[in-house]
Image: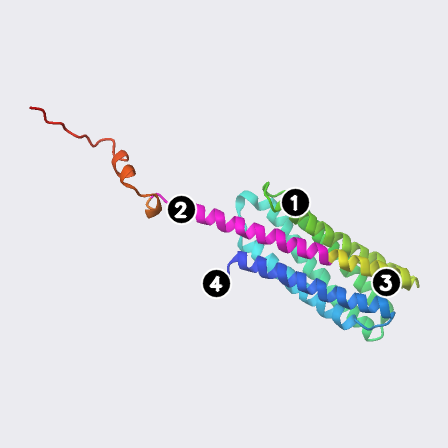
Amino acid sequence: MTIRGEDLLISGAWILGVGSLIDTIGQTQQTFTHSDQGKDLIIKGNGIEAFGNSLQAIGRTKLLKPERELSQIYTIFGAWLEAAGNTTNSVGVSIELNGAEEEGIKIDTLGSGVQGLGAAFEAVGASLGEDSSYRALAITGNSFISLGSFLGAIGNIYVSNEKSVIGEQILLVGSWIQVIGAFILVNAITLEVEHMEHEENSKNDSYPYSYNNYSFTNMIWGYPHLKLDVVTS
């Protein structure tokens, strides 16, 4: 069975949203308890986000069109970068839990930076796309994800410099900004897929031999060489 690119986009967006929410719940627990509580959820959340990003990248690749190639390449590249960044986040936090806290934080910081860069590429790709009702939402959603990710990197830098309280607060704010961005993106991609399906249906409806466009009037006027002879007496 072949999975449509549109289905991959929608699925990836929702999975990304769920993953970011799980990640943020874990970060909220960690911030308020000042402990490692919640890190398991952070690991799982980032892993789920990476899977969602991958589905989006594959979906975009399946829908690649020559006339929109530049914007789509930016978006595909950005989605793969986000997947790599989220995967790196999961690895970094796992290393922290295993006792190598300093090394884990560095890897987590790198992952957040890569994720932020990927979301920025997606925002640029959206800005280069066709003027539509969903473009502004796509730019906004990806910009929020990018900002939240960079805040995550900054928060980790504070934590590694023994300023844990302010660092954890920045991490928390960054996580919630990502959640907002992810669900804005869900809305944007839903509208985009509806637009694609509408375009596809319009092409099918405009097929010259479609029964929807067939009428007695078209039959008569479509053949100007036919003439009616009038017999007079």
Residue type pointed to by label 1 = Ala
Tell me the tag on residue 136.
1
Measuring from the top left, give residue 187's x and y in whole percent: 62, 53
State which tag comes first along the sequence, 1 or 4.
Answer: 4
What residue would you read off at disc 4?
2
Q: Which mark is residue 168?
A: 3
Q: What type of secondary structure mainly makes up the magenta span?
A: helix
Query: Magenta stretch?
Result: 179-208
Q: Earlier in the sequence, mark 4 or mark 3?
A: 4
Query: Do the CB atoms of the residues marked 1 and 4 lie less than 8 Å apart?
Result: no
Q: Report x, y in % for residue 181.
A: 70, 54
Badge 3 local density, few (<14 within 10 Å), some, or many (20+)? many
Residue where numbered disc 2 is placed = 205
Q: Nearer the viewer, mark 2 or mark 4?
A: 2
Quadrant in the picture for the C terminus = top left
Judge left or right: residue 208 versus residue 163: left
| Callout 2 crowding tier (Cα within 10 Å): few <14, some 14–19, many ≥20 | some
**Circle 4: element type:** loop
